[in-house]
Amino acid sequence: MSLKQINQNEGRGFEEASQQLLLDIAMESSLRELNQMANPSPKPASLSGYYQSLHEWRSPASSEFKN
């Protein structure tokens, strides 16, 4: 076996290990995101907390109709 063939084999091994590492990282990130979607944060217990949480993700619509 020549030195060039050995380097190619090592290169393939490194490439496969790198791809596997990237796949593992992506799968771990996807699993974490899926768990966050499946187990959302607890809802506010009070009505004022509910309206406060609505205000965080939605702007008031009244400003759109003041013309």
Image (cartoon, rainbow, N blue to C red):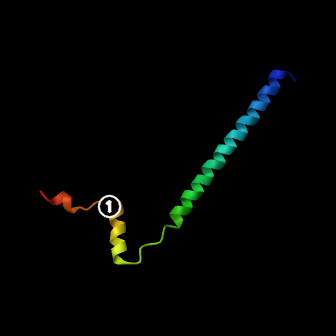
Q: What quarter of the picture does the N terminus occupy?
A: top right
User: What residue do we see at 69% from left, 44% from top?
Assistant: 20
Please indicate whether residue 35 sits to the left or right of residue 19 in the image: left
Q: Quadrant of residue 18?
A: top right
> Residue extending furthest bottom?
46
Q: Residue at x 79, y 26 (%)?
A: 7
**Could you tell me which residue is drawn at 78 percent across and 31 percent down?**
10
Q: Position of residue 56 (x, y in %)?
A: 35, 62
Whether residue 60 is situated above or below residue 19 in the rendered picture: below
In the image, 63: left or right of 7?
left
Pick the front one: 16 or 41: 41
Q: Could you tell me which quadrant the C terminus lies in?
A: bottom left
Q: Residues within 10 Å of mark 1 (few under 14, many from 20)?
A: few
**Where's residue 63, x and y in %?**
19, 59
- Location of mark 1 (residue): 58
Please, what secondary structure does the residue beneath circle 1 have? loop
Residue 32 x, y percent position in the rendering: 58, 58
Occupied quadrant, residue 33: bottom right
Q: Nearer the viewer, residue 1 or 62?
A: 62
Q: Is residue 45 above or below residue 30?
A: below
Amino acid bearing label 1: Arg
Which residue does the image show at 83% across and 22% down from the upper left?
Answer: 3
**Residue at the left extreme, as displayed:** 67
Q: Is residue 16 above or below residue 7?
A: below
Numbered label tally: 1
